[in-house]
Each structure stands twice: as C-alpha cells, then as structure tokens.
Amino acid sequence: MAGSFINITLKVWRQSIPDTQKEMGKGKFETYRAENIPTETSFLEMLDIVNNNLVKKEKNL
Amino acid sequence: MRLDSKIPDGPIEKKWERHKFNLNLVSPTNKRRYTILVVGTGLAEASAAASLSELGYKVIAFCIQDSPRMGHSIAAQGGINAAKNYSNDGDSVWRLFYDTVKGGDYRSREANVYRLAELSNKIIDHAVAQGIPFSREYSGYLHNRSFGGALVSRTFYVRGQTGQQLLLGAYGQPSREIKRGGVVLLTRREMLDLVLIEGKARGIIVRNLVNGNIESYTGDAVMLATGGYGNVYYLSTNAKASNCSAIWRAYKKGDAFANPAFVQIHPTCIPVHGEYQSKLTLMSESIGNDGRVWVPRNQDDKRDPNDIPEEDRDYYLERRYARFGNLVPLDVASRAAKQICDEGRGVGSTGLAVYLDFADAINREGRKTIEERYGNLFEMYEQITGVDPYREPMMIYPAVHYTMGGLWVDYDLMSSIPGLYIIGEANFSDHGANRLGASALMQALADGYFILPNTIGDYLVEIVPGAARIEHSSFKEAEKYSTRRISDLLSLNGKKIVEEFHRELGKIMWDKVGISRNKEGLKKALEEIPLLGERFWKEARVVGSGDCLNSILEKANRMADFLKLGELMALDALKRDESCGCHFREEHQTLDGKARRDDSRYAHVSIWDYNGPAKTASLYKEKISFEYIKPEQRSYK
C-alpha cells in the first residue's frame, strides 16, 4: 500500500574475505535496524537504504 | 581516425556471401596460436565466445557477475524476429530488411540491416537445434506473434522469457568449451582500461572485484560485448550492474563513439512508484498483441478503470494510428503516452501512467489462452504492483530500455581501433534511430554466432600471435592509470552517497535528454552535467578499501563514467538538429506531432572522437545513403 512505512530488524552475515579450501573467511552476523521503509520498496532497495545510511555514518562497509 | 565502413560492393543480396569469400582465413592449425579477450556477459558474449572457441581460437572471457548466465539478455521477454514466413503472411528477408530500416527512421546502413535480416533465419535454426523450447502450435510448428512496426507475425518466442531461454542455450556452448579448455572464464572482473600497442588493441586491465587486484591480460584481439548504457538515466529497465565503463574506457583510448543520443524509451513499463526505487520493470511489448491502451476521456474522471464505460475511454493509439493501433513502433507509443500525461490525462497516483487493458482479449479468447501467452508477465506485474491484471487494467509508463548508439563499427564489426571488435548492444550498428521490438536478440546472436567468427580471421591473419607482453610500457601505464583511478575514488570523503549523484544525473537526462528534447534544454544539460561532475569529485563519499569486495567503489567508478557519457549524449542530441526515431527534437515535428527528419543535413552517423578531459570531442560524419529503400516520412496511420 502506497504511503505506509515499516521497521525491520535485519540479521546480516558479514564477511569481507571469501572462504578458501584452506581456511574459512571470518564472518559473523550483525544486527541492523531498517526504519521507516516505504512498503513499496523491494527487499534489495531496502538493503540499499540500510547501506547508504551506514555509509553516511562513516561505518566501514 | 579509421572510419572506413568497408561495405562490400555488389547487389545487396550478394554482399555478405561475396564478402565472406573475399576475407582472409586463418588456417585450422594456426587458430590455436591466437588468444581473443572477450569482455561482457549475455547473448552476444556467449555466442561469440563459444563460436570462436569451437573454431579453435583460445578465448579468455571476463564478466562482472558470478556467472555469464546473469547477463542482462536474460531479461529479454517478448521474442526474436526472423523472416521465416511461417505465418504465410507475406514476410520475407526483404520485408524484415525494409521494416528494420524504416523502423530505425532511415539512420542505419542498408548493407548491415540486410545481412541481419538474412541471418535471422539461421539463428532460429541454430536455437532450435540447441533445444530452445520456442512456443509451438498444436501441430508442432513454431508459433509466431506480432511486434511493433510490422504488419506480419515474425516473432519467435518462449512465453515471456525468450532471452532467458536463448541465454541458457547460448551459455551451454561456452560451458562445454570451458570444460574442454578452449574458453577460460574469469568471473567478477571489471574492465578498467584497454591497452593499445602500436595503435592496435592488445590487451585489457581489469579489477578483480573480490580481492581488488589490478590484473593485466594480453590478447591478439579484444572483443567487447558489454551491453548498453541506459543506466545513465539511473532509472531504466536495465540490470543494476549494466554500465558504460568498458566502452567508455575504449572511447577514451581513441575509439569512435557513434550516435550516443539514440536511446530507446520503451512504452510498456511499470510506472515509477517511489523515491527509493532502484530500477524499472518492462512489460514486454508483445502484450500489445492483446492489450489495448487507453485513458479516460475526461481528465477529471477518477472512477476505477472497470467502472469507466467504453464511451468515456480514449483508446488514443487506435484513434491516431488506425492501421497499426497498439502495435506502433516503440518510439511512437512512448511519445504518445508522454503527450497524454503532459496534457494531464494520465492515471494513477502520480498521473504518470496509462492503462493497458486485457479485458477484451480475455473475453474473446478466454483467460487460459492469455495465461499461456503472458502468464509469467502477468504474475510479475501482480507481484510488483499488488494488482491482478486479469481483473484490472495494467498501468504502464515509458522507461529507458535500450541504446541504439554505441561504439562505431565497420561491416566486419571492428571498431575504429584495429583489433577491437564490438558486438551486441554495445555497438551502434543496425537499429538506426529506433530499434524494433524483438530485434535486439536477433542482432546479438547474428553478431556473435555468424558475423564476428567469420570476420575476425581477416584481421588476425596479419597479426603475429602472442606478440604482446604485459611487461610492455603500454600495460605498465594502463596499470598505473587504473591504480590511480581507484585510489582517487577511495579518497572521496564528502557527505553525499554515489546514488544521490546518480539520481540527479538521471533527472537531468530524463528531463532534458529524454523522450523529447529541445535546444534550450540540451544547452542547460550541457551546463548542469559538468557542474554535477565537479560536485561528484568533491562531495561524494566512498568508504571501505580497494583490496576487497567494495560495491560502493564499483558504483563510484561507473558513476564517474556515466557523468562524462551523459555530457556526450547531450552534445550529440544538440548537434543533431532534426527529429528521427527516438531522437525527438521538439523544434522539428509535423503538424500532427510526428518526428520530422532532415535527410539533406543529417542522413549520417554522428561519430565522436575523444580529445582529452579539457576539450570538446570532435565530430565526424559517416554518410548514410540509400540505394534500395527510398526514405520517406514514417507513417503508421
């Protein structure tokens, strides 16, 4: 429905280096809040919003 | 600049066969000594990589995705044209040739288009042999449907997912070659630069998107199949990863860019819904076979569409274009929708939409038949909008979809740089100022399966294989440039995210270099885009490091190129002081609002040559002449 907003709690797996045959890249779950997300946004667009907010807060991605 | 189109002499029906005979061949035992670098994903890339490898050449293929199966060709829905005349409705190679030249508003080369029409039938045979599950009649014969700009049914299709099925078929071939060792596939690599040695394309520099390494590769020829640049508008139907960087870096190395202003805006897309929207979705033009476009007669009529009776509806395409109706070419349908919405007669919450109604078709043929034809499209529409198009008309609005412009190529698909070949949407070759629906897949596969594999040998035979070395100073300079570029982008420490600049660029492009253009708007765009570029390099924010996966860095890298390309597109649109096909200059229209060409001054390809960052590009012209088709005012009435 146009004009509605929702808040979502996300558990995101973060891992900067891929797994190799020798060792597992060290990854972990982190929790993020996605707030005031318009309901017409897609899941990936919601992640864009979360990412862009993190960039603005100088959080290293 | 090397701008000889190399169109062969002789009657048009004989040109390609005769030309193939006159081309030099590389002997079968020598082919394995040559390495060809193939950049891109999609139908053009897969078909060329497989065909070259099967011939015996060594191929190294690069793509930015995890797999070449993720190329944007996979999104093509409606179908692929061919002049088989299975419908027995008067089609022929000649008619497909004529329709394509006319549809392109007489801005494409006759010889190229004739060859495309001629090869179209071979593509279908090839695809059937691969097992592509084209829709068939009950009897088993392949079924055809109609597309815009044609009065015959010549479009072969696989429900609404023709591109996906063709890509799976095309990708099967290089997969076998990868296993055999003929193709080396390097995924998640993005081209940063083209390397020239003695004026010839001899290699590329790529960034490994996973670990950030800058890598150099040598080859005896380079082929770009990197698709179109519609994402310069930010919102388009292209995949998010589609970008202009590979062709733009080649342009900066001296390659000619042709007709950058020729951009197709597709009439049947799901309308924009909100601020955070990242891309638009196409509803195939094929639905025009059964859908009827309309708006309420009265702009204040806010009733639900199903409550509006026939007499209060304006089926404006059928009213204006009695002969072609809802199947006018894409550019004509897009402009008509925009005009209706500009008059305040659009529907939906934004007023930027028109209805596409299937009620008549469902009543006439039954829901089951419509489901068989477009089931997946209807489902996709419902998933995105929450509205069931079997019960309520779809809402559609034009969106950027395809770029006819691209790097200039000759008849052999070689660009102005010797040894650099451009195929598929990345080149400018066959669609003139407007591509007809279902012709993009046809061109990508004609280029990849049948043209390039025949022509490339003529160049290679003159080349000493394996002569390029990554120790060469040209590679070192290109590596240095690429490394500096990445560190410059990483140093951007402003306050705005890259998407904000991209949206701003998209708005300038859509408003001033979009469906319709005028001198004043284009001049304004040429002032605004460079200023936006300056702000980007001061105010953008790129975080993270260069030695790992960094999607912000990737976006910033592509964005910097889009800014420069946007400027070139506006310049090209300004200099082409006529209307033709998708390039609609408001100053040049007929009394009833149709594009008015100026063949005496603009029957040419506009070709741009890079002059460095501080100078305006130089404009060259390749004259387009017509021997077989007489240019006339396009009419679809």
Image: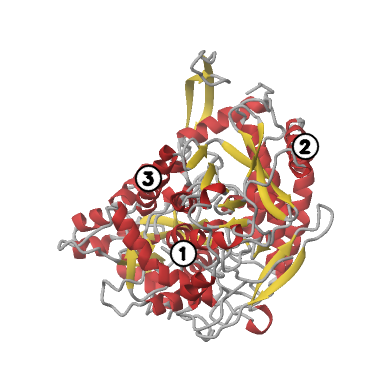
| For residue B250, side relative to residue B16 (left or right) | right
Q: Which quadrant of the figure contains the C terminus of chain B?
A: bottom left
Quadrant in the rendering for residue B591: bottom right
Q: Earlier in the sequence, mark 3 or mark 1?
A: 3
| For residue B552, side relative to residue B475 (left or right) | left
Q: Residue at x 61, y 52 (%)?
A: B221
SS class of the residue under badge 3? helix
Q: Residues within 10 Å of mark 1 (few under 14, many from 20)?
A: some
Quadrant in the rendering for residue B549: top right
For label 2, the residue is B480
SS class of the residue under badge 1? loop
- Please state the horizontal and vertical placement of residue B413, each as a whole percent of the image: 57, 63
For label 3, the residue is B172
Q: Residue at x 69, y 49 (%)?
A: B249
Q: Residue at x 72, y 34 (%)?
A: B486
Q: Nearer the viewer, residue A5 or B457?
A: B457
Q: Nearer the viewer, residue B532 or B224?
A: B224
Q: Which quadrant of the figure contains the N terminus of chain B?
A: bottom right
Q: CA distance from mark 3 to mark 1?
A: 52 Å
Q: CA distance from mark 2 to mark 3?
A: 37 Å
For label 1, the residue is B299
Residue B158 visible at all = no
- Please state the horizontal and vertical placement of residue A3, each as a whole percent of the image: 48, 39
In this rendering, the answer to whether B626 lies above or below B457 is below
SS class of the residue under badge 2? helix
